[in-house]
Image: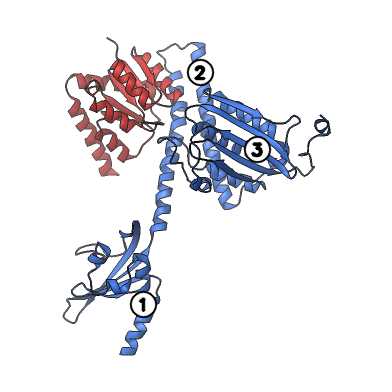
């Protein structure tokens, strides 16, 4: 009998779930090692007390509660921990409750992922609805039979339909690229690409709808040629410039520079905006991350930098940020040299 | 007398969309591109109605509505939320903070003037609370069927 009890206790103490048993009076008689880890309460502090005293809440579902696993939260220090709890009632020969056993797992990280997914769906829905409003709205407006719009007005409405459609396409492209990056099905068309030319094009696009900012393009004559997928590089630079504008709400200078390096090219995008706190320098590149020091209500899917890094890594490059909070940011990109070696200064340039 | 409407939205195309469609129905329109500017314009011009976006840089629409309703000069101006936040809890929040209607984007701008006119007329008849109660009960029905 003693041997069996010992064996049972050995199993329970090594099991991956937290196991807690209480007697008919609700006093804890078993608190295994996993229960200690999950709750942060050692067994010697828990044994003999009631669960509600130890965890500041009860694990029992109460009479009439539906059977099966339930999610509840407990506090471990200042951290909220979510548990998935199942419960078994032990009855004595007379059929009355002789005790209860609870098994639980820490599901906090699963819960966080679910929360992030649900926030993401809400964000994407918002991001899609905004350009759709303009497209649908201006189309309906143009179809009004009771108003005669001038040619200039009609052109403005059509231009908005076009530019907001483009915005919608960019969001959908981002979503597709993320899905492809994650499934390893992203296709790159790597060819010799002049970073300087791409930078100029992207600046021209961003400038169209950001007239409060001063844009500066600093690229050497003769261009900076790397091996890259031109469209993807353009997508990355667009995302960086959009961020530069978004995070410098008071306007200011946004500059983009490209330089040849012995083993590749370096592109720097600098703004005079809110900056990135040191602690977030890595985190900003993670999926769904959205800046907290940005102003609330700022748009964005939280995919831009995640995607930028993914695309650059896929092209053999890398990206990082140099910034202090409140003092603007510089995003630095490195890309490998073109296999033809054209990244080196052209002869005529070197001779100057 | 023509109605004067203030549109508070950070998206220029959406402000234009509201402007042309409301002006087409004889209303006059003022615009504000963020919450702070919206509050200033509302105090200065006391429009007959406000179309208010929620997610804007700086002061968001919820805070703008609260400030408008807390201020003696602006608390009688009917607020209609106009937002891409389509979640039912956001609708409840919009009506909860004192909005009289809640339009989710995308919306048909051709119908905007009628909607504004109806809300303003109901408020002028002294039916502000009835209107809110009606919208809240619509919402409860939606919640019930969800």
Compared to residue A313, the image places residue A69 above or below, namely: below
Compared to residue B99, the image places residue A117 above or below, namely: below
Q: Nearer the viewer, residue B136 or A1?
A: A1
Residue A159 makes an appearance in the image: yes
Mark closer to the observer (2, 3): 3
Q: Which tag, 2 or 1, sits closer to the chain's start? A: 1
Picture disc at residue A267: 3
Chain drawn blue in the picture: A
Q: Chain of mark 1?
A: A
Residue at 39% x, 18% y is B19
Picture disc at residue A92: none
Distance from the alpha carbon under mark 2 to that under mark 3? 35 Å
Q: Which residue is identified by label 1?
A: A12
Residue at 41% x, 24% y is B33
Q: Nearer the viewer, residue A344 or A117?
A: A344
The local secondary structure at tag 1 comes to helix
Distance from the alpha carbon under mark 2 to that under mark 1? 72 Å
Estimate how packed mark 1 is, as few (under 14), some (14 to 19) or many (20 or more) residues with alpha carbons within 10 Å. Answer: some
Percent coordinates x, y for residue A133 in the rendering: 43, 29
Residue at 53% x, 35% y is A328
Compared to residue B97, the image places residue A71 above or below, namely: below
Residues marked 2 and 3, same chain: yes
The reply, left or right, for residue A296 in relation to residue A87 is right
Estimate how packed mark 3 is, as few (under 14), some (14 to 19) or many (20 or more) residues with alpha carbons within 10 Å. Answer: many
The quarter of the image holding the C terminus of chain A is top right
In which image quadrant can residue A90 be found? bottom left
Percent coordinates x, y for residue A175 in the rendering: 52, 42
The quarter of the image holding the N terminus of chain A is bottom left
Residue at 34% x, 74% y is A32
Picture disc at residue A156: 2
Q: Which tag, 3 or 1, sits closer to the chain's start? A: 1
């Amino acid at each position: 009998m003693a041997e069996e009890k010992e064996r049972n206790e050995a199993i329970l103490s090594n099991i991956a779930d937290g196991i807690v048993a209480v007697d008919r009076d609700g006093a804890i008689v078993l608190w295994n090692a996993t229960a200690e880890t999950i709750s942060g309460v050692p067994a010697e502090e828990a044994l003999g007390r009631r669960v509600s005293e130890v965890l500041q809440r009860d694990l029992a579902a109460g009479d009439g509660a539906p059977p099966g696993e339930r999610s509840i939260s407990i506090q471990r220090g200042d951290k909220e921990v979510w548990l998935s709890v199942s419960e078994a009632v032990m009855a004595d020969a007379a059929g009355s409750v002789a005790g209860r056993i609870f098994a639980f797992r820490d599901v906090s990280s699963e819960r966080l992922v679910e929360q992030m997914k649900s926030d993401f769906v809400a964000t994407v829905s918002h991001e899609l609805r905004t350009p759709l409003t303009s497209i649908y709205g201006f189309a309906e407006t143009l179809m009004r039979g009771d108003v005669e719009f001038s040619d200039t007005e009609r052109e403005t409405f059509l231009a908005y339909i076009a530019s907001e459609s483009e915005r919608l396409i960019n969001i959908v492209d981002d979503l597709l690229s993320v899905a492809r990056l994650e499934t390893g099905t992203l296709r790159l068309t790597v060819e010799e690409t002049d970073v300087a030319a791409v930078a100029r094009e992207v600046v021209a696009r961003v400038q169209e709808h950001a007239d409060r900012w001063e844009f500066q393009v600093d690229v050497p004559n003769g261009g900076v040629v790397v091996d890259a997928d031109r469209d993807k590089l353009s997508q990355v630079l667009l995302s960086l410039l959009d961020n530069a504008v978004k995070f410098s709400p008071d306007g200011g200078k946004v500059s983009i520079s490209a330089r040849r390096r012995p083993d590749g090219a370096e592109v720097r995008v600098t703004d005079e905006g809110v900056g990135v706190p040191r602690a977030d320098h890595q985190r900003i590149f993670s999926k769904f991350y959205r800046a907290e020091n940005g102003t609330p209500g700022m748009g964005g899917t939280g995919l831009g930098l995640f995607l930028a890094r993914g695309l650059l890594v896929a092209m053999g490059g890398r990206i990082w940020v140099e910034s202090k909070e409140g003092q603007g940011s510089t995003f630095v990109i490195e890309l490998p040299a073109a296999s033809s070696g054209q990244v080196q200064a052209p002869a005529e340039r070197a001779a100057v | 007398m023509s109605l004067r409407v203030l549109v508070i939205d950070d998206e220029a195309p959406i402000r234009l969309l509201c402007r042309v469609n409301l002006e087409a129905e004889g209303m006059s329109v003022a615009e504000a591109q963020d919450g702070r500017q919206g509050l200033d314009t509302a105090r200065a011009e006391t429009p007959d109605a406000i179309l208010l976006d929620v997610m804007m840089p700086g002061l968001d629409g919820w805070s703008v509505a609260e400030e408008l309703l807390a201020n003696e000069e602006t608390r009688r101006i009917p607020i209609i939320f106009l937002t891409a936040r389509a979640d039912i809890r956001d609708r409840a929040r919009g009506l909860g903070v004192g909005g009289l209607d809640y339009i989710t984007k995308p919306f048909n701008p051709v119908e905007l003037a009628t909607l504004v006119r109806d809300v303003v007329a109901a408020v002028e008849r002294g039916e502000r609370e009835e209107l809110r109660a009606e919208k809240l009960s619509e919402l409860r029905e939606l919640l019930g069927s969800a």
